[in-house]
Image (cartoon, rainbow, N blue to C red):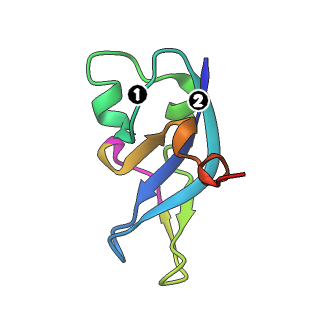
Amino acid sequence: MATYDISVHCQDCGKVHPVLLRIDLDGGPDEKRSVAEVFRDRLLPPQLAAIKGHSAFCHKTGRKFPLQKDNDIFLIPPVKFRRYSVVR
């Protein structure tokens, strides 16, 4: 089971922002993928369904926006986490 960071595409500035939430999944993607792609023919896990309606923060505009569309919510695998990409 791998832990995935959750990020969201911002409609205001067009960038992808971290939501500061993580989810544990079996059989998740090896690369950054939208929730809509990963769960196209499967039920959405309750943890992901529960974040809909929560807000994310745009660091550029300073505004909050709701997490609504599965196409705009992304799962980022552990090897892509910033803390793991730093060479020690």
Q: Residue at x 33, y 68 (%)?
A: 11
Question: Can you give x and y, in whole percent of width and height, for residue 49 in the image?
Answer: 50, 32
- Residue farthest toward the front in the current orientation of the protein: 88
Q: In this view, does 45 lie above or below 49?
A: above
State the residue position of label 2: 47
Q: Which residue is drawn at 44% across and 55% down?
A: 8
Q: Is residue 12 above or below residue 45?
A: below
Three-letter amino acid code at the position of disc 2 = Gln
CB atoms of marks 1 and 2 within 8 Å: no
Q: Which of marks 1 and 2 is nearer the N terminus?
A: 1
Q: In this view, does 42 lie above or below 59?
A: above
Q: Main secondary structure of the magenta part?
A: loop
Q: Does the magenta stretch include residue 61?
A: no
Please indicate whether residue 57 sits to the left or right of residue 8 in the image.
right
Q: What is the span of residues highlighted in magenta in the rendered image?
A: 66-70
- Mark 1 or 2: the one toward you: 1
Question: Can you give x and y, in whole percent of width and height, for residue 34 in the image?
Answer: 34, 40
What numbered label is drawn on residue 6? none
Dot 1 alpha-carbon crowd within 10 angstroms: few under 14, some 14 to 19, many 20 or more: some
- Residue farthest toward the right in the current orientation of the protein: 88
Q: Is residue 11 above or below residue 18?
A: below
State the residue position of label 1: 29
Q: Distance between the residues labelled 1 and 2?
A: 16 Å
- Taking depth in this image into account, of 84 and 24 the one nearest to the observer is 84
Three-letter amino acid code at the position of disc 1 = Pro
Question: Can you give x and y, in whole percent of width and height, for residue 12 in the image?
Answer: 36, 76
Q: Residue at x 45, y 23 (%)?
A: 28
Dot 2 alpha-carbon crowd within 10 angstroms: few under 14, some 14 to 19, many 20 or more: few
Q: In which quarter of the image is residue 39?
A: top left
Label 2 element class = helix
Q: Which residue is drawn at 41% across and 29% down?
A: 30
Please indicate whether residue 36 sits to the left or right of residue 4 in the image.
left
